[in-house]
Image (cartoon, rainbow, N blue to C red):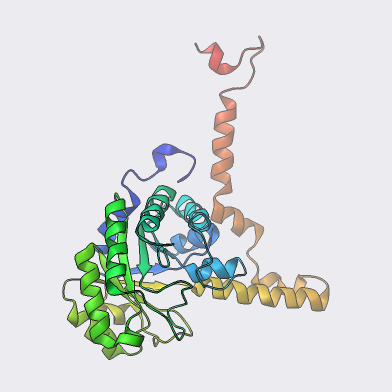
Amino acid sequence: MPYLVAKDLPSEPAGSRFRTLLDRPAILRMPGAHNGMAALQAKAAGFEALYLSGAAMTASMGLPDLGILTVEDVCFFIRQIARSSGLPLLVDGDTGYGEALNVMHMVRAFEEAGAAAVHIEDQVLPKKCGHLNDKKLVSAHDMAAKVAAAAKARRHLQVIARTDAHASEGMEGAVARAKLYIQAGADAIFPEALTTADMCRDFARALPGVKLLANMTEFGRTPFFTAAEFEAMGYAMVIWPVSSLRVANKAQERLYAVLRRDGGTQAALGDMQTRAELYAAIDLAAYEALDASIVQTVLPSAHGRNALDASR
């Protein structure tokens, strides 16, 4: 029972647990989890850390990924994923929701909500998905100030600086920015939308000893690579940010088509999570057992006093 019983909660802060995983020699694999159920299913599959994508959050709300979310919108998602899974969670912090003080507010809010790590990017608002065209960047100095602000505000949260500079400033510009962001206090670097294996390797070679995050999003600019391939290129982390949402959305699309066509869901039953599978995933039996154990201690006695009173 990771949520309701305090003794079952992790004693170590999420950021510290994330750092421990990151310091292991093997690449840290983080699938995207767009809600609490996805987080539970990823945990059941054996993953030790999760990723929360801004694109997945906005899409699940029926919105485009253009910096529309607020800090509190994101905290709602952080709380449910951290609460349900108990796993360290890396969160997409977009551009930090403003300048230095806004970034510090974001860090405090995310850490209090249960996040383990956050990445912020060097785009201007309205920001774009990293795999789209015509991204506009803030100056390297302004981004470094945000990174420094984030590092100053955090207690245990890991700070990852994302750079979208390769598309407009080339490898040399992206590497120069990354080095500046590390000097400003970033714990790791996220080079977005590299388009070849050679680019991925070149970036890693230019930053020896720096923890790097790879983004394996589908239908984007980066070719398909496995976690093992990214590890061989020199990367310490990999995310699959929107995969779970893409699969869920496609399944829902098929369901609504069947329901509209047939006037019933019989033809879709084979694609559904059963009631028993749902209850097992959310551990309903454990919640019911906990509830029964608490109620049992306060049942009224024959003399109108409850059991707790009678024991005093």
| Residue at (46, 60) in percent of width and height | 44
Instruction: Find residue 299 and report its horizontal and vertical position in percent.
Output: 62, 22
The quadrant where residue 195 appears: bottom left
Residue nearest the observer in this picture, 267 or 126: 126
Residue nearest the observer in this picture, 287 or 141: 141
Q: Residue furthest right?
A: 263
Q: Residue furthest top?
A: 303
| Residue at (60, 65) in percent of width and height | 61
From this viewpoint, is residue 296 visible? Answer: yes
Instruction: Find residue 103 and report its horizontal and vertical position in percent.
Output: 37, 58
Q: Residue furthest left?
A: 208
Question: Does 301 appear above or below 11?
Answer: above
The quadrant where residue 135 appears: bottom left
| Residue at (22, 71) in percent of width and height | 180
From this viewpoint, is residue 232 visible? Answer: no
| Residue at (40, 43) in percent of width and height | 9
Question: Does 107 appear above or below 217?
Answer: above
Question: Does 126 appear above or below 150?
Answer: below
Instruction: Find residue 159 and report its horizontal and vertical position in percent.
Output: 30, 61
Residue nearest the observer in this picture, 48 or 125: 125
Q: Is residue 294 left or right of residue 211?
A: right
Number of residue marks: 0
The quadrant where residue 167 appears: bottom left
Instruction: Find residue 32 and report its horizontal and vertical position in percent.
Output: 46, 68
Residue nearest the observer in this picture, 232 or 242: 242
Question: Does 115 appear above or below 232?
Answer: above
